[in-house]
Image (spheres, rainbow, N blue to C red):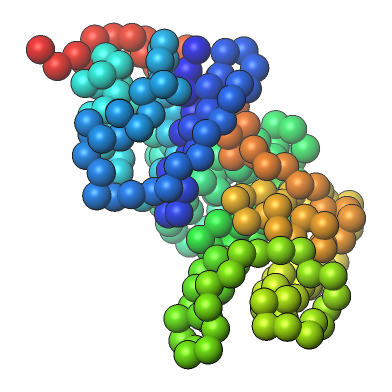
Amino acid sequence: MINLIDIGNSNIVVATYDGELMDTSRYTTDTTKSIDEYYTLLKDVLKDSKGMVISSVVPELNIIFKNLAIKYLSFDPIFVGPGLKTGIKIMVDNPKEVGADLVASAAAAIAHYGDDAIIIDMGTATTITYIEKKVIKGVAITAGLVTQRDCLIGGTSQLTQFEFKKPAHVVATNTVDCLNAGLLYGHAKMLEGMVGILKKNHDNIPVLLTGGAARFISDLVDESFIYDEYLLIKGLIVISEKNIKKDIEFKKSYAVQ
């Protein structure tokens, strides 16, 4: 059994894999927590772990999770990054700028949906990744839904925090519904417009919708969009299968004496 971990700016998702994807758990990202505090939080889902594959976009937590695995589980985890086999190529100005999360999701898209794909990942930022013939050709980035909401509320005096809820109409008659209509429909139609541009020369390319905030607009976008909640985690499975056998055994001892 291995653990698959997605460390994002807002949330950390931990899944277990033992030939098939098992339970997943979601935690709030906290860069102030220590190794011991994170182990106390995660020890139940890490129990019996023989390895760990991590996608992280929070560099300050990389050393925390690396040392957690070494101290408490006696193995060195694998991080998605340069030198790791992923099955994809990156054709951008600076490949090192492409986040581990985008690489992991791309690996899953290629393995499960084909060599071409458009991936929309909705987290702290919303990213749109264009893949052609197993090559990441480019990425667009905009503010995520939660980021937009918090920025809007923080910049106004009469708006308060609210939970996202699918709007009944494009316009509404009370403040919370108006905000949901504007943010959710606005985000959905923005994404449809961006995808429309990308699909001009490749109409049959699959469009994959994923990320923590994707569930809020999955019913508002074009029905051709494919909602895949665990796309990134599936990518970590693909990457683990390409790398674990060639890597040193996970259980090689790094235990703290």
Residue at position x 30%, y 40% in the image: 62
Asked whether the viewer can see residue 72, the reply is yes
Left/right placement of residue 66 relative to residue 110 reads left
The quarter of the image holding the C terminus is top left
The count of marks equals: 0
Left/right placement of residue 167 relative to residue 96 reads right
Task: Give the percent coordinates (x, y) of residue 16.
Answer: 53, 22
Foreground residue, 173 or 249? 173
Q: Against 125, is 159 above or below?
A: below
Q: Residue furthest bottom?
A: 157
- Residue 183 image-quadrant placement: bottom right
Task: Give the percent coordinates (x, y) of residue 236.
Answer: 54, 31
Foreground residue, 48 or 177? 177
Q: Against 225, is 240 above or below?
A: above
Left/right placement of residue 87 relative to residue 55 reads right
Foreground residue, 49 or 117? 49
Q: Against 200, is 231 above or below?
A: above
- Residue 64 image-quadrant placement: top left
Task: Give the percent coordinates (x, y) of residue 227.
Answer: 76, 47
Residue at position x 40%, y 39% in the image: 82
Q: Against 142, is 127 above or below?
A: above
Task: Give the percent coordinates (x, y) of residue 151.
Answer: 49, 78
Foreground residue, 132 or 111? 111
Residue at position x 53%, y 28% in the image: 15
Asked whether the viewer can see residue 138, the reply is no
